[in-house]
Image (spheres, rainbow, N blue to C red):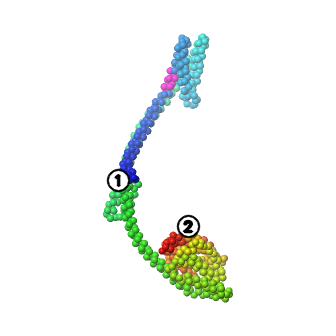
Amino acid sequence: MESTKKMGSIRRRLVMVFAVTTGVVFLVNMYMYYNINKSISTIDEVYVSNMELNNLIETLADVQKYVYEYLNTKSSDSLENYYRSEQTYRELIDKLNRKVIDDDRMLMQKNIKNMSESYLNTVDDAVNAKRGRNIEKYKVKYEDAFTLYEYIRTYINSLNNEHFKYNSNHYMLLLMSLHYLEVISTAVLLVIMIFNIILIIVVTRSITGPLRNLTEAANEVAAGNFEVDLLQTNSADELEIVTKAFNTMIFSIHEYIIKTKESMELQSKMEQKELMMTNHLKDAQLKYLQAQINPHFLFNTLNAGAQLAMMEGADKTCLFIENMAEFFRFNMKSFDRDSTIGDELKLVDSYIYILNVRFQDGINFYKEVDEEVLDKRVPSMILQPVVENAVNYGIRNIEYEGRIELKVYQERDTILITITDNGAGMDKSTIDRIMNARLQDSAALKAGAVAKDSNGIGLGNVINRLRLYYDREDIFKIESGGPNKGTRVTIYIPKIDLALKADL
């Protein structure tokens, strides 16, 4: 259904282009038509004020004429005409601006209004005097009204002239505006025409461009070049359907080639990894064999056992010898077999017991273990070398009381093992050298801690074996605040990898 909707989208695009261009032209024409009509309406309004003043003076003349006729004839028709013209004149007067401002025309309008009020009042007095047969009074009032009439006519004519001058100037400005509007209309139409041409070019290029790219890519594939880049299109039309089909074909070819290469590389990598593991195990076995015959270590250990036997009796001596036997037994077992976290902790306990016998309980060791993970499988000999490093290079030669803490706990999909001491600490360069060392870097591995009474397995060896075992770089972390601020080592054991190892 989606492809059906897309069919004809190119046609819709072309129709939209022409519809938009036509709509723009129509809107521009409507805008110009509106402005032209507005200008014409403004021109018509220019002389409205003159027409109103002419109407005002004509109505004033009617009032004066009908008053004169009534005063001479006293006919009811004249009186009725007078009242009608008077009412009309009052309405016209009310339309005049009532504000007194600095503008001369506005001031003249106020004077006309005030004089007109006086005039109409005087005329009313004359009419009432005529109706009351007061001859002297209506003659005087009529003469006063006639004088005001002449003044009003003069003011209205002057105001009319001022309006005419102003409207003439305004009229010329409007004519100039119409001329400019005509020029602007022509320019806008030209711009729209150019825009329409550019829009048509862009739309047609958006259609022909992807077709040209698709043709070139198809020719490359036909020539045997399967490394062509995938085509990009966002047209959402028939071209997109064809382009996606072509990209799917290219992707399938690339995927097949990549899988073939990866298969070969994986096989080679597995062989290299197996060789490196073998070298690491041989290196560890060699060092342990050397440690087993280390005269100094054996002498000190056996001498401590003899002293303990002499001072405290056979029970503790037996316990000491059992721990020694357990320690050497673990050292001599095959490195081809995995260990468990529980076995690694037992080895650490034996090691700490031996050291406390040698140094008269001088090792303050504490541990906190989540027992749910004791049966989890790990590479052998990954904890005792770290604890040994904390003893020899952390708390051995400090002047204050040393302390070592070992914690085993879980966080989400990871088992974390931390060994923390409050000893001499490490500087950043030493940490970087140990973390970046490889098995072949003997100097760096020695810097990872191999003491004269050590079992010979340094931190570098532990780090490399963990990385190879789990195929991860972020498996081991060393932190230190600096001199005399202690060191923390964290080992990250992934649970998923543990499950896979157990299945294997």
The quadrant holding residue 270 is: bottom left
Question: In the image, what residue occupies the spot 55% across and 87% down?
Answer: 293
Question: In the image, what residue occupies the spot 60% across and 81% down?
Answer: 350
Tag 1 or tag 2, which sits nearer the N-term? 1
> Could you tell whether 478 is left or right of 182 in the image?
right
As shown in the figure, which amino acid type bears the numbered disc 1? Thr
Majority SS type along the magenta span? helix
The vertical placement of 170 against 428, above or below, is above
Residue to which mark 2 is pinned: 412
The vertical placement of 112 against 384, above or below, is above
Position in image of residue 480 (x %, y %): 59, 72
461 or 246, nearer to the observer:
246
Check disc 1 and report its element: helix, strand or loop: helix
Position in image of residue 347 (x %, y %): 58, 79
As shown in the figure, which amino acid type bears the numbered disc 2? Arg
- What is the CA distance from the residue labelled 2 to the residue labelled 1? 55 Å
The span shown in magenta is 50-58
Residue to which mark 1 is pinned: 208
